[in-house]
Image: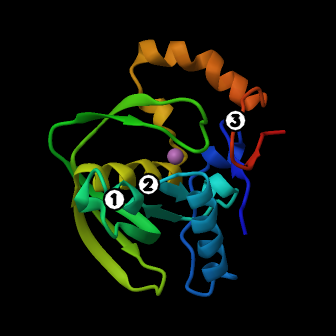
Amino acid sequence: MILPVYVYGSPVLRKVTKDIDEDYEELSVLIENMFETMNQSDGVGLAAPQIGKSIRLFIVDASPLAEDDPELENFKKVFINAHIILEEGEKWEFNEGCLSIPGIREEVKRKPVIRIQYYDKNFEFHNEKYDGIKARIIQHEHDHLNGILFTDKVAPIRKRFLKNKLAAITKGKVEVAYKIKFPK
Ligand code: NI
């Protein structure tokens, strides 16, 4: 089932999410719905707050980008109770977008190497290192779990430039090809 994506201005996007238990209600259905939602909106990542749930869960699927970047082949994963425990290296810029902030893309600086602890969809524990685009996608989604959006991280001068555009999204003055839910 395709779920509506909550957009900029929705309070749930600003909450710090909570860890979940293995017996979280209909978790596998939720994950399936999140993949369906992400795929039909051409996203490479989706965090639970973006579909209105304040829980520590996000998914990624960058395999459609593997044509340009072979390392992304099979990079399709579920991260439950994910915590980045280390970020290192010299920050690098990459052009980011977000399904919750339609029509806006900006350069964002982040560190290139991360270590993350999480549980997969079978609740198996993992402690893994990522770099490059994979780390970048994970960092963006992991930020959602802490109520942080990529527009918070752009240079101050760009922030000023974005202010009106972000306000327009919150008011519903934006055209989006996928199903969205505007803040009340
Ligand atoms: Ni996002």
Q: Earlier in the sequence, mark 1 or mark 2?
A: 1
Give, as a three-letter code, the residue at label 2. Answer: His
Q: CA distance from mark 1 to mark 2?
A: 8 Å
**Disc number placed over residue 142 in the picture, else none:** 2
Q: Which residue is mark 3?
A: 9
Q: At x 56% / y 53%, what residue is drawn?
A: 16
Number of other residues with Cα within 10 Å of mark 3, as a class: few under 14, some 14 to 19, many 20 or more: many
Q: Secondary structure at mark 3?
A: loop
Q: At x 54% / y 29%, what residue is drawn?
A: 104
**Disc number placed over residue 84 in the picture, else none:** 1
| Residue 180 versus residue 96 in the image, above or below | below
Task: Tell me the quadrant of the picture where the C terminus can be found.
Answer: top right
Q: Earlier in the sequence, mark 3 or mark 2?
A: 3
Q: At x 29% / y 54%, what residue is drawn?
A: 135
Q: Earlier in the sequence, mark 1 or mark 3?
A: 3
Task: Tell me the quadrant of the picture where the N terminus can be found.
Answer: bottom right
| Residue farthest along the left direction in this orientation | 89
Q: Position of residue 54 (x, y in %)?
A: 64, 59
Number of other residues with Cα within 10 Å of mark 2, as a class: few under 14, some 14 to 19, many 20 or more: many
| Disc 1 and disc 3 in contact, CB within 8 angstroms | no
